[in-house]
Image (cartoon, rainbow, N blue to C red):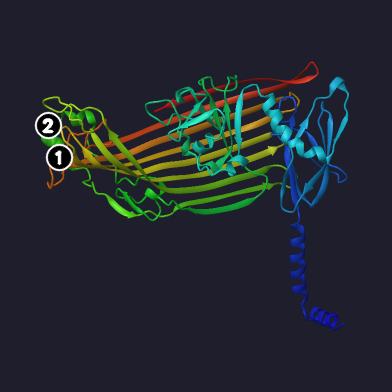
C-alpha cells in the first residue's frame, strides 16, 4: 500500500508535458514493433516474373500488386503468423499459411504461380509445412527451366566464405578454375574463349595483349550472385566458347539499413616483420599514384629516343628520378573497412517508390613470400664453351607485396508504378599492387665460376574500372509484353609507372659490389638498370534492348524473346 501511494504522489507532481513526452516515447516504441513480408511472384513454368499479380493478407483486407519485377511487399506488419493469397488472371490461385513475421525483420517469400488447366480456376492451399519449401522450389525451378547449362553461387554462400574478391569466389564454382588468382578458365578452355558481363554489360579486356578479364578487381561484398553460363543462348553474346561469367551486383533492398564493418588480420610470416618497399607516394594508400612515378612531361617517345645521339639519350635519362633505394619499415596488420547503407521511400498511395544503395570498401593486405630458385643446367662459358659442372645460379628470392582493393558503389532505382521501373547504377573499383622483390645468392653470370649476386625490382601496378548504367523495365499487361533497355559505359585503365630493376655482383672475394649492366635480372626478358613505363586504357560502350512476349500454347504459358544489342570497344 505504501508503494501505491508513492506512485500516486509522483504522478501528481509530474507536469502534463512530461507525461506527454512519456506517452510519445511509449507510442514510438510500440509502433516500432513491426516487420515486412516481401518476395517475387513468378511463373512456375518459365520463372518469369508476373507483374500485376494480386497478393492479399487473409482476414485483414490488406492487399498489394506485384510490380514490373514481380515484387510484392507488405510494410509495418505486427509480429505474428499470416496467411497470403495470390491471384492472377489465367493462373490457379494459391493460398499460403504459416508465414511468421518478427519484429524489425524482413520475411522473404517467393510465390510460384501455375497456369490454369482447361480454363478451370482452382484455389490451392499451401500449409506452413510446405511454405518454407516454396522459396527453395523457386530456385530449383529457375535452374530446371533454364534453356542453358549453368552453375551459380549466391550472396549467402559468398558471405560464409573468406573470399575478398570475385577471383577468389569463382574458385568455388563447379567447372571453373583460376589462373594467377584472377583469370577464369571454364571447363579447361583458355580465358580467351570466355566472356564476362556485369549486370548485363559486356566487360572489356583488362590485358593489352590478350582477351581476358581480371576478376580480382571487384570486392566480393558488392556481389549479389555470380552465374556461369556454359552453353549458348540467343539472349547472350556469341563471343564465348568456354563460359560466360555473369556478375550481378547488389540491388536496392526493401528495407533501410546502415552497416559498418572493420577488421584486422595477422600473418605470422609478415606482420611486424621487416618489410622492404620503394618510395611511397601520397595516394598509395588508395591504390593510386600521385604522379611522382610518371615520366617527365617532355620525355620523348621510344621512337624519337632511339634516334637521339648517345649524349642526348644520357641527358634524357638523367631527367628521370634517381631513386633506386630500398626503404625498410615494419609490416603492419592487414586491414578491412566496409561501409554500406540503403534508403527507400514510398508515396502514400504506394507509388512512386525511390531507393538508393551505397557502399564503400577498403582492403589493405601485406604479404611476404620466399622462393628458392636454382638451375643445374649446363652453361657455355666464353670463350671456350666448356661445362663447369656448377649450377648456373642459386638464388633465394623474397617478395614484399602490398595489395590495395577499394571500391565505391551507388545504385538508384525509381518505380513510377507497378509496371515501370528506372535505374541508374555506378561502380568504381581499384585494385593495386605495390611490390618489391629482392634476390640474393650466387651466379656464374658468364664468368665460369659462381660469384655473389644481389638484385631487386620495384613495381607499382594500378587497375581502375568505372561502370555506369542507365536503364528501365516496363510491363504492358494488355499486350503481355515486357521490355527491358540498358545503356552502359565502362572505362578501364591499367597503369604501371617506373618499373625498376638492378643487379649488383662481386667479381672476386673481398671486392666491392658494382652494378652489373647488360645481365638479365628477375625478369629474364630485360636487363639490369632497366626502367619500364606502361599505361593502357579501354573504353566500352553499349546498348541492350530486350522484348519478352508471353502467350498461351497447348494450355501452357510460353515466351518469345527477341531484342537488339550493340557493343563498341575502343582502346
Rendered image: mark on residue 217: none
| Location of residue 452 (image quadrant) | top left
Say if residue 40 shows up in the picture: yes
Q: Residue furthest bottom?
A: 2
| Location of residue 526 (image quadrant) | top left
Q: Secondary structure at mark 2?
A: loop
Percent x, y of residue 379: 20, 28
Q: Residues within 10 Å of mark 2 (few under 14, many from 20)?
A: few
Rendered image: mark on residue 315: 1
Say if residue 296 shows up in the picture: no
Q: Is residue 486 above or below residue 434?
A: above
Percent x, y of residue 52: 76, 33
Q: Nearer the viewer, residue 103 or 351?
A: 103
Q: Residues within 10 Å of mark 1 (few under 14, many from 20)?
A: few
Q: Are marks 1 and 2 in contact (CB under 8 Å)?
A: no
Image quadrant holding the C terminus, namely top left
Rendered image: mark on residue 309: 2
59 on left or right of 448: right
Q: Nearer the viewer, residue 540 or 230?
A: 230
| Location of residue 125 (image quadrant) | top right
Percent x, y of residue 155: 61, 40
412 on left or right of 270: right
Amino acid at each position: 500500500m505504501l508503494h501505491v501511494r508513492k506512485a500516486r504522489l509522483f504522478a501528481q507532481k509530474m507536469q502534463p508535458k512530461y507525461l506527454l513526452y512519456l506517452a510519445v516515447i511509449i507510442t514510438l516504441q510500440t509502433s516500432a514493433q513491426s516487420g515486412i513480408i516481401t518476395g517475387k511472384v513468378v511463373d512456375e513454368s518459365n520463372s518469369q516474373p508476373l507483374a500485376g499479380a494480386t497478393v492479399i493478407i487473409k482476414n485483414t483486407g490488406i492487399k498489394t500488386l506485384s510490380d514490373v519485377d514481380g515484387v510484392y511487399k507488405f510494410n509495418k506488419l505486427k509480429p505474428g503468423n499470416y496467411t497470403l493469397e495470390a491471384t492472377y488472371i489465367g493462373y490457379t490461385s494459391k493460398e499460403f499459411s504459416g508465414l511468421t513475421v518478427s519484429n524489425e525483420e524482413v520475411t522473404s517469400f517467393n510465390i510460384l504461380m501455375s497456369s490454369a488447366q482447361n480454363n478451370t480456376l482452382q484455389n490451392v492451399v499451401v500449409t506452413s509445412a510446405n511454405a518454407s519449401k516454396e522459396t527453395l522450389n523457386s530456385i530449383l525451378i529457375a535452374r530446371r527451366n533454364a534453356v542453358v547449362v549453368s552453375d551459380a553461387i549466391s550472396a549467402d554462400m559468398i558471405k560464409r566464405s573468406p573470399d575478398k574478391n570475385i577471383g577468389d569466389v569463382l574458385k568455388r564454382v563447379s567447372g571453373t578454375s583460376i589462373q594467377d588468382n584472377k583469370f577464369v578458365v571454364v571447363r579447361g578452355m583458355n580465358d580467351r574463349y570466355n566472356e564476362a558481363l556485369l549486370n548485363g554489360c559486356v566487360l572489356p579486356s583488362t590485358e593489352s595483349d590478350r582477351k581476358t578479364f581480371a576478376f580480382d578487381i571487384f570486392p566480393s561484398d558488392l556481389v549479389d550472385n555470380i552465374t556461369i553460363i556454359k552453353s549458348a543462348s540467343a539472349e547472350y553474346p556469341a563471343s564465348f566458347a568456354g563460359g560466360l561469367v555473369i556478375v550481378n551486383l547488389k540491388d536496392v533492398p526493401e528495407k533501410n539499413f546502415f552497416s559498418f564493418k572493420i577488421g584486422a588480420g595477422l600473418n605470422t610470416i609478415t606482420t611486424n616483420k621487416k618489410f622492404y618497399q620503394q618510395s611511397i607516394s601520397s595516394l598509395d594508400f588508395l591504390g593510386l599514384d600521385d604522379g611522382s612515378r610518371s615520366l617527365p612531361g617532355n620525355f620523348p617517345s621510344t621512337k624519337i629516343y632511339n634516334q637521339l645521339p648517345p649524349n642526348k639519350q644520357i641527358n634524357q635519362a638523367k631527367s628521370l628520378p634517381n631513386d633506386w633505394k630500398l626503404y625498410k619499415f615494419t609490416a603492419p596488420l592487414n586491414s578491412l573497412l566496409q561501409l554500406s547503407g540503403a534508403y527507400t521511400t514510398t508515396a502514400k498511395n504506394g507509388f512512386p517508390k525511390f531507393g538508393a544503395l551505397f557502399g564503400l570498401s577498403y582492403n589493405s593486405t601485406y604479404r611476404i613470400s620466399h622462393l628458392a630458385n636454382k638451375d643445374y643446367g649446363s652453361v657455355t662459358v666464353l670463350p671456350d664453351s666448356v661445362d663447369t659442372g656448377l649450377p648456373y645460379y642459386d638464388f633465394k628470392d623474397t617478395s614484399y607485396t602490398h595489395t590495395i582493393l577499394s571500391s565505391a558503389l551507388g545504385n538508384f532505382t525509381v518505380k513510377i508504378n507497378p509496371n515501370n521501373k528506372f535505374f541508374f547504377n555506378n561502380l568504381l573499383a581499384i585494385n593495386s599492387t605495390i611490390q618489391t622483390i629482392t634476390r640474393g645468392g650466387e651466379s656464374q653470370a658468364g664468368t665460369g665460376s659462381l660469384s655473389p649476386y644481389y638484385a631487386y625490382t620495384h613495381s607499382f601496378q594500378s587497375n581502375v574500372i568505372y561502370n555506369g548504367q542507365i536503364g528501365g523495365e516496363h510491363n504492358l499487361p494488355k499486350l503481355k509484353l515486357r521490355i527491358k533497355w540498358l545503356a552502359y559505359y565502362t572505362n578501364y585503365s591499367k597503369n604501371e609507372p617506373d618499373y625498376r630493376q638492378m643487379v649488383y655482383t662481386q667479381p672476386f672475394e673481398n671486392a666491392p659490389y658494382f652494378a652489373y649492366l647488360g645481365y638479365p635480372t628477375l625478369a629474364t626478358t630485360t636487363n639490369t638498370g632497366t626502367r619500364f613505363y606502361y599505361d593502357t586504357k579501354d573504353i566500352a560502350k553499349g546498348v541492350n534492348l530486350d522484348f519478352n512476349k508471353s502467350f498461351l500454347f497447348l494450355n501452357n504459358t510460353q515466351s518469345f524473346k527477341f531484342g537488339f544489342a550493340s557493343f563498341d570497344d575502343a582502346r
